[in-house]
Image (cartoon, rainbow, N blue to C red):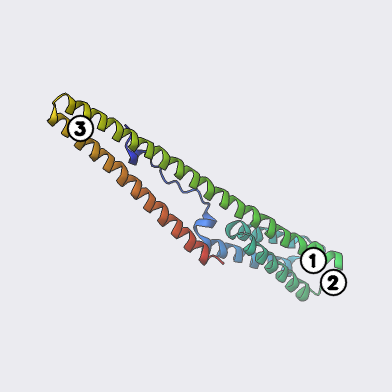
Amino acid sequence: MTDAAESLPTPVPRDPWFRLHPRTALGVAGGLYVAVLLLTVLAGTPGDDYFLLYVFPVALIAIAFGWRAGVGAGLAAVAFVIVWVVVRDVELSPTGWVAHVAPMLVLGLLLGTAADRLRAAEAARVEVEAAALLHREAIEINDLLVQGMAAARWSFQAGQVDAGLKILDETLGQAQELVSALIRQAEMGRRAQDLGGLEARHRP
């Protein structure tokens, strides 16, 4: 019979670096904002498309923190575009403003929404896997108890009291180990959910 501890999935870090280290992601995004701003102000001309480089920090923040942060990142990019317009005294037509503003906002919204849905799907998949594992372990415990009780009953009916008691002790011990493993697994899952909720509340 497979031990319950062996059936537990080995934790593998699946999140990319910008989710594991959100502060680092914010720092990188901030550096990208500043770099693109300096490039547009110091080296760019009104005809250049350097402003499109703002898609990198916007995309990073949207994927790391979701659609709300993505829209905020798009608005930050728009603010930097306004700084460029003021500093370089650039005149943009209404169409030019739409071309400079809309891509940043749409990108932040779409990528952030997709990232939120992926996280929700991953959480649902983990819950389904955990439920399936608990179901298998419950079946294993049930089979163990039924088989052990049946073997002990046969021993008692055959007059082998000592053998029956030994089988009962072994069956109860194995069942206790399986139940303890399930309890530990449930506690680990609850702690992981608590940590995930705490991290989500502290995200910008």
Instruction: Look at the picture and state if 72 lies above or below 19.
Output: below
Residue at 50% x, 59% y: name it.
Answer: 21
- Between the residue at mark 3 and the residue at mark 2, the CA separation in whole angstroms equals 89 Å
Q: Quadrant of the rendered structure where residue 168 is?
A: top left
Residue 160 coordinates in the image, percent (x, y): 13, 27
Is residue 183 toward the left or the right of residue 113 in the image?
left
- Give the residue drawn at x 47%, y 42%: 129
Residue type at mark 3? Ile
Secondary structure beneath dot 3 equals helix
**Of labels 1 and 2, the one closer to you:** 2
Mark 2: which amino acid? Glu
Figure quadrant of the C terminus: bottom right
Q: Residues within 10 Å of mark 3 (few under 14, many from 20)?
A: many
First along the sequence among labels 1 and 3: 1
Tell how many labels.
Answer: 3
Label 1 crowd (10 A; few <14 / some 14-19 / many >=20)? few
